[in-house]
Image (cartoon, helix red, strand yellow):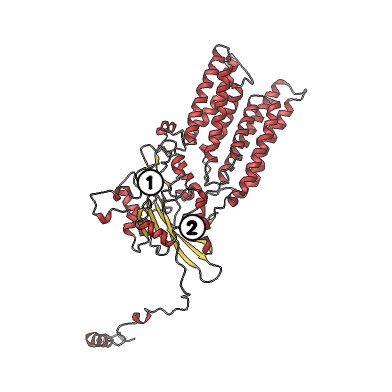
């Protein structure tokens, strides 16, 4: 699949933003006044920034409001509704915390749940796609959610929880890669079933329908950087999980001063962000859509 | 509404005969022509006369070589357009309701005024039947020529999809699969009409007729038409004979 930067940026930034919103909603931490403003500003900047970036891949972003209609069947529609609901409810919670120094726990819990639900719906947009066997399994939502929660803990400065959650996220990401690598072969979809000609002999794509390229090839049969996939996976894991854990562990040393703590924590978040971005790039770049079989490209 | 109808009154679709298709791509061109000039946004071409031409097509013809374990390989031309699936995954993923399956005849359509161009329906289609138009930025797909088949301004014989109407080999057939006595139902039943990627659970309406096995090995055959292709006049006579001699007699005529 073509790794569209706007979509990768969206899932990376919004995932982190909604993760932080979830922690803030659950009251970990529970800031008030100006410090609450800073916390919520960061969370909203990430979540809303990601959402805005996602509209850049639309052909007609001016019609985006129509996308809230089909929640009964469409995960993309559900995502839009959940995202807006989460941002509104958390906005209410944030206002109470910033202007009245009164966090409203129930509102916070609802907002936190909606934030996590938003990330779940994002994951389901990909999970439901049967034509990409790598995505069509439980590791996709497990990976999206665990990375979102771990990133939220990291950003919320919850060192102990963050280390545990980062390890869980790493396991989910690994499972996604291991199961994903075998998914197309196990799906049973081949050139034989695609053409229906398999029981007659070995099928080979003899001539494509066109001499140039087309939308299908650019969007679904896109191959880029696959030869670097193994290196990129190691890099993604190192930046997303290992470096942040090491940096967080350093903040726990007594010899490290308070201001150094903040720098180390900021580095941990930055490293995590770049790592997630790399993993999400691979999520698209390595995804094999079955339509490639018609072109003999799988 | 992007939830699928539980059943449709008719199941309009195509039978594509892989035995008969000669791979001439006439259906591709007639489809492009009709659907550029009629229903919805035109099918754009980009860099049409340049180095990297690309365009939107609703119907494309692949060619496959099938090598059996014994005997000669077979070349099979394989037209592919929307299969108007009963359980169309492209419809349910649509966030705006732009994609829908009609209750009256089962045709899967896109309301282009509601399409936000997110591309998710094309992701969900295993057959590559949907293409985002590079200029209009909306999703294009086969309409089964919905603007021909019910069009009373056209002569009756033209009220079928452009690809079916134009096929010189008679490899494409249009009809109602809900009616067991229809041409397409009978054809599909008699010839073992098959689904593409049945494991995807899309329940395609369009059926493909498998190529008939070759009845004998023709590799040693002498072309029975060859004798008729010999030059008709080996020896020129009459006026042409005189002309032949006259031209030979001219300076530089005979070499």
Q: Is residue B182 left or right of residue A82?
A: left
Give the chain letter at badge 1: B
Return the residue at label 1: B106
Q: Neighbour class for label 1 at 10 Å: few (<14), some, many (≥20)?
A: many
Question: Are marks 1 and 2 in one subunit?
Answer: no
Q: Nearer the viewer, residue A296 or A212?
A: A296
Q: Are marks 1 and 2 in contact (CB under 8 Å)?
A: no
The residue located at (37%, 42%) in the rendering is: B103
Q: Quarter of the image for the N terminus of chain B: give it.
A: top left
Q: CA distance from mark 1 to mark 2?
A: 23 Å
For residue B254, above or below residue A275: below
Query: Can residue A93 be seen in the rendering of this structure?
Result: yes
Query: Can residue B29 be seen in the rendering of this structure?
Result: no
Residue A236 position, x and y percent, is 64, 39
The residue located at (49%, 58%) in the rendering is: A196
Quadrant of the image occupied by residue A11: top right
Mark in front: 1 vs 2: 1
Q: Neighbour class for label 2 at 10 Å: few (<14), some, many (≥20)?
A: many
For residue B249, above or below residue A11: below
The residue located at (52%, 60%) in the rendering is: A198
Quadrant of the image occupied by residue A167: top right
Return the residue at label 2: A195
Residue B149 position, x and y percent, is 30, 50
Give the chain letter at badge 2: A
Q: Secondary structure at mark 2?
A: helix
């Amino acid at each position: 699949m073509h790794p569209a930067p706007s979509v990768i940026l969206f899932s990376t930034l919004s995932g982190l933003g909604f993760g932080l919103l979830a922690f803030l909603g659950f009251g970990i931490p529970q800031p008030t006044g100006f410090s609450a403003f800073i916390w919520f500003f960061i969370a909203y900047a990430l979540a809303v920034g990601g959402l805005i970036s996602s509209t850049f891949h639309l052909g007609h972003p001016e019609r985006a409001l129509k996308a809230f209609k089909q929640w009964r069947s469409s995960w993309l529609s559900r995502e839009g509704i959940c995202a807006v609901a989460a941002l509104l409810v958390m906005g209410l919670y944030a206002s109470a915390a910033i202007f009245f120094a009164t966090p409203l726990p129930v509102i916070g819990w609802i907002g936190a749940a909606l934030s996590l639900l938003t990330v779940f719906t994002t994951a389901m947009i990909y999970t439901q796609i049967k034509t990409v066997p790598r995505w069509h399994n439980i590791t996709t939502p497990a990976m999206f959610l665990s990375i979102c929660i771990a990133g939220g803990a990291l950003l919320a400065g919850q060192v102990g929880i963050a280390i545990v959650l980062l390890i869980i996220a790493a396991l989910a990401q690994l499972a996604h890669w291991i199961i994903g690598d075998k998914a197309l072969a196990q799906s049973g979809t081949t050139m034989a079933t695609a053409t229906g000609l398999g029981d007659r002999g070995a099928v080979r794509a003899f001539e494509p329908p066109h001499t140039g390229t087309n939308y299908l090839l650019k969007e679904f049969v896109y191959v880029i950087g696959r030869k670097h996939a193994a290196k990129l996976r190691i890099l993604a894991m190192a930046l997303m999980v290992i470096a942040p854990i090491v940096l967080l562990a350093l903040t726990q040393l007594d010899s490290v001063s308070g201001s150094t703590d903040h720098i180390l924590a900021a580095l941990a978040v930055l490293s995590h962000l770049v790592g997630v971005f790399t993993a999400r790039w691979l999520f698209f770049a390595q995804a094999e859509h079955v339509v490639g079989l018609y072109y003999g490209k799988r | 509404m992007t939830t699928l109808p539980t059943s449709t009154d008719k199941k309009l679709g195509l039978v594509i005969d892989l035995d008969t298709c000669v791979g001439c791509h006439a259906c591709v061109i007639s489809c492009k022509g009709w659907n550029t000039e009629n229903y919805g946004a035109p099918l754009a071409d980009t860099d049409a006369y340049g180095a990297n031409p690309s365009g939107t097509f609703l119907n494309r013809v692949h060619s496959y070589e099938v090598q059996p374990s014994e005997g000669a390989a077979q070349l099979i031309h394989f037209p592919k357009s929307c299969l108007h699936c009963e359980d169309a995954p492209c419809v349910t993923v649509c966030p705006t309701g732009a994609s829908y399956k009609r209750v009256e005849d089962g045709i899967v359509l896109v309301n282009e005024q509601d399409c936000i161009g997110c591309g998710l329906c094309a992701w969900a289609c295993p057959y590559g039947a949907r293409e985002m138009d590079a200029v209009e930025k909306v999703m294009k797909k086969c309409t089964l020529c919905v603007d021909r088949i019910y069009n009373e301004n056209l002569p009756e014989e033209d009220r079928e999809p452009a690809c079916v109407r134009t096929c010189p080999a008679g490899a494409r057939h249009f009809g109602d699969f809900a009616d067991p006595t229809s041409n397409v139902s009978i054809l599909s039943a008699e010839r073992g009409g098959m689904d593409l990627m049945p494991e995807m659970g899309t329940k395609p309406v369009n059926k493909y007729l498998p190529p008939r096995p070759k009845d004998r090995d023709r590799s040693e055959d002498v072309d029975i038409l060859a004798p008729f292709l010999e030059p008709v006049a080996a020896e020129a006579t009459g006026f042409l004979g005189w002309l032949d001699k006259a031209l030979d007699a001219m300076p530089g005529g005979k070499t």
